[in-house]
Amino acid sequence: MSDLVKIINRELSAFGLRIRGIKVFDEITPFEGLDAKCVALIGHIGGENWDHFQAWWSKADHQDLDHPLDTWSKEIINLLAQKHEGVAVFPSDEPYYPFQNWALESEALSKSLINLLISEDFGTWHGYRGAIAFEEKLDFAFSENHALDVCAICEDKPCLSACPVNAFGSAEFLYSECQSYLKTKEGEASCMTDGCSSRNACPYGQEYKYKIPQMKFHMRAFRKP
C-alpha cells in the first residue's frame, strides 16, 4: 500500500471515512488540468461516518443547508485533495463521473437487484462520498473477488417480494411507483420511517445495517418534494 494511501486513510478516519479502492486508468485521464493515472474512491462502510456527520450537522450554521451530507463530504475531501495535490470529484456534481463503474473495478462488489452495489460482506450498507484524482499511480490492496454475483446465488431474493409496489425486478426500476408510495401514509409509516423495505430484506451485511436516523435521512433525501 502506498505511503500516501496510508496517510490519507489516517486523515479520513477522523471523519469515519476511508479509501474504499483505487481505480487505475488504462491511459492518462484529464481532471481539471491534472493528468490523472488513478482516482482514490472515498466513502464508508456501515454507519461509521454517521456520528461524525451528525456532530457537524448539529451546528447552528449548518441547519438550513439543502444538501448537508454533500456539503460535509466536500469540505473534507476538497481539503485533502488540495493538501495532497490531487483533484476532488463528487458523484453529485457534473460532469457525472462513472463512480459505480470505478467501484466495480476496484472493490469486491457486484450490481444488486435493487440498483445498489452489493458486497458479500457488508451488503448494500455502504456509500461513496467522493474521489480524488492523482497524477501518480497509488498502490492499494483489495479483494480479487470481483466476479461473485451475490444476488445470483441468493435463492429466495427477499428484496423483490419486500417492496410494497414491486418497483424492482423488471427491466428497469419503477421510479414513479416508488416515489408515489413514499408520499402516502403507508409509505411514511414503513419505508420512510424504517428505511427501504427491499434494502432491509436483503440477507447480506445485516450487521452493517444503518441505524434508523441514518435510514430516515437517506430516504428523505431520495424522496422528492
Image (cartoon, rainbow, N blue to C red):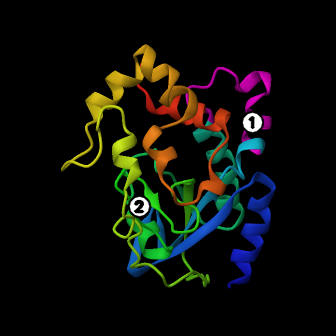
Q: Is residue 134 above or below residue 32?
A: below
Q: Is residue 141 above or below residue 18?
A: below
Per the image, label 1 sits on a secondary structure element best described as helix
Q: Nearer the viewer, residue 73 or 162?
A: 162
First of labels 2, 1 by sequence position: 1
Which residue appears farthest toward the top when viewing the image?
A: 185
User: Which residue does the image show at 44% across and 59% down from the upper left?
Assistant: 117
Q: Nearer the viewer, residue 156 or 116?
A: 156
Pointer 2: what residue? 100
Three-letter amino acid code at the position of disc 2:
Gln
User: Which residue does the image show at 70% across and 54% down from the upper left?
Assistant: 79
Q: Is residue 187 above or below residue 194?
A: above
Circle 1 crowding by C-alpha within 10 Å: few under 14, some 14–19, many from 20: some
User: Which residue does the image show at 42% across and 68% down from the upper left?
Assistant: 150
Circle 2 crowding by C-alpha within 10 Å: few under 14, some 14–19, many from 20: some
- The magenta stretch spans which residues? 52-68
Three-letter amino acid code at the position of disc 1:
Gln
Q: Is residue 30 magenta?
A: no
Q: Is residue 176 above or below residue 201?
A: above
Pointer 1: what residue? 54
